[in-house]
Image (cartoon, coloured by chain):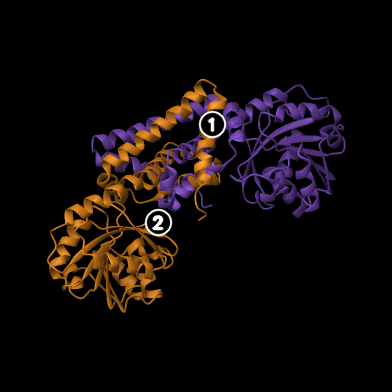
Chain colours: A orange, B purple
């Protein structure tokens, strides 16, 4: 690949750029962002070769475009960029939801231009390219969500792209993806935020590592997560209902002083947590 | 101090022993545990100088006893050890709840023997002295909960003991302590466990760092936490009610597609999380 365009030069976009640079995946990296200061800084530090606010100008030069903007903006930007792309250009993204994005773009691209949805299971609660990590994708999983109509060679190129950044890839149906990550990622975010939100500030000095870890996700950008929740509303509500039911089981066990029942619930959580592959 | 007795040679007890050893706080360390294999291993690795299953035998030799057993056992063991102690012996603990322990022991000790409740805000979801950490208490806070009738010199010795292990100390009322940690520690445990408990095993490969951190506490020992929840039931139920109310606010915002309201809730969590002192 000669030219890579990164749309949205934040933590994710910066990490894609850094990883591509480190691993020699791109000859030239163009960043597209609406904040001139971000582009100037990212060019100065060598993260980007070039920065522009003009999406079409970047699109016509790029072989691969990776959209790293909030999920509500991705379809609009993909459709805006596509007409400027040369035939054979590959478009992909890093959005945390997939079905809505894939559906909004499907059948609306010029011939010869392909979009393949991607979601790297890697990230950070931090924001900004200054926290970018060139090893963010190493040994992580990227979920790639082609449809029946996606050009197989575009899927293949997407898989090779993420593998070149050090990740493993799993192909998945977009709707199945959204239901799964509602439970494994979006719900933990919501719960982490609710947990942090109810602690009075004067008690913060009385917290330890458990609170710190459990609420880490609460530090993420609210606007970014608002758009993720909005894009995956039914699946998030269904995951939330399941969680509320489990919390009710805990409450009933406590209220009835059913300590054996409480221990069974704790054991259930431990067994699943202990089955997690080592990180 | 010449002789330190550790009652319960697990992760916490082992860490107190290691820290005391590292920092020259004790000339001799005796471990009391009901598992001979644990004592044998802890003596072989140099964690302990001596191990015994006989609490009274250890008590009569010790200058300071630190009870590191589950919270439901601490009062029984303190009252069992006290008659064997020499006058001037200091007894303290590392239990995660304080009011019940302090009340059960109060006014029931022989003259010259003092118990002062302690709770180090440090720990791990791991179990066993093989995971002990001699630096576990460094720069951490230990909450010490004397009553009006606790001998001030015993309080002073307890403070100096924890400071000698590298910790800072804050004196607190035991009931206030229990209400605070219900929100900052016991609730996060319960929530972490509920979150892990509802994820189907086949989705575990689709989790990332967020799920890992949010559910870390779910890996803790169910029997240990059962006794903590039992010992702090009203405060845990009240913290849980507050959490359920916050979760309901999230659900209503999602159901009504009130995305501005959702962002406000996320912002509330972020502001509190961001106010957390750096760890």
Is residue A132 in sight in this rendering? yes
Q: Exactly how many numbered labels are in the figure?
A: 2
Q: Is residue B87 left or right of residue A21?
A: right
Q: Position of residue A179 (x, y in %)?
A: 32, 45
The mark lying in front, picked from 2 and 1, is 1
Q: Give the image quarter of residue A155.
A: bottom left
> Circle 2 — which element?
loop
Position of residue A103 relative to residue A202, above or below, is: below
Q: CA distance from mark 2 to mark 1?
A: 36 Å
Determine which residue is flagged by label 1: A264
Q: Residues within 10 Å of mark 1 (few under 14, many from 20)?
A: some
- In depth, the one of A42 and A185 nearer the eye is A185
Position of residue B164 relative to residue B238, above or below, is: below
- In depth, the one of B77 and B142 nearer the eye is B77
Q: Is residue B54 left or right of residue A118?
A: right
Q: Is residue B211 left or right of residue B230?
A: left
Q: Give the image quarter of residue A162.
A: bottom left
- In depth, the one of B175 and B6 nearer the eye is B6
> Circle 1 — which element?
helix
Seen from this angle, which residue lies furthest top?
Answer: A256
Determine which residue is flagged by label 2: A126
Residue name at image x 42 percent, y 48 percent? A217
Q: Position of residue B48 (x, y in %)?
A: 80, 48
């Amino acid at each position: 690949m000669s030219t890579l365009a990164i749309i949205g030069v934040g933590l994710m976009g910066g990490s894609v750029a850094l990883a591509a640079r480190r691993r020699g995946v791109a000859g030239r990296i163009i960043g597209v962002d609406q904040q001139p200061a971000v582009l100037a800084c990212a060019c100065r530090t060598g993260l980007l070769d070039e920065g522009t606010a003009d999406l079409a100008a970047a699109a016509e030069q790029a072989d691969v475009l990776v959209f790293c903007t909030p999920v509500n903006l991705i379809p609009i930007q993909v459709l805006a960029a596509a007409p400027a792309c040369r035939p054979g250009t590959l478009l992909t993204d890093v959005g945390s939801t997939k079905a809505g994005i894939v559906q909004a773009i499907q059948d609306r691209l010029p011939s010869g231009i392909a979009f393949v949805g991607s979601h790297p299971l890697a990230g950070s609660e931090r924001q900004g390219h200054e926290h970018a990590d060139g090893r963010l994708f190493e040994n992580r999983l990227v979920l790639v969500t082609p449809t029946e109509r996606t050009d197989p060679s575009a899927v293949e190129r997407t898989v090779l792209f993420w593998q070149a950044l050090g990740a493993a890839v799993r192909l998945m149906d977009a709707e199945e993806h959204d239901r799964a990550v509602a439970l494994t990622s979006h719900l933990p975010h919501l719960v982490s935020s609710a947990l942090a939100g109810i602690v009075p500030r004067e008690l913060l000095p009385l917290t330890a590592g458990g609170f710190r870890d459990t609420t880490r996700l609460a530090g993420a950008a609210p606007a970014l997560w608002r758009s993720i929740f909005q894009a995956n509303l039914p699946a998030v509500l269904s995951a939330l209902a399941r969680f509320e039911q489990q919390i009710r089981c805990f409450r009933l066990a406590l209220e009835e002083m059913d300590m054996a029942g409480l221990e069974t619930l704790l054991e259930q959580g431990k067994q699943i947590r202990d089955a997690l592959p080592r990180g």
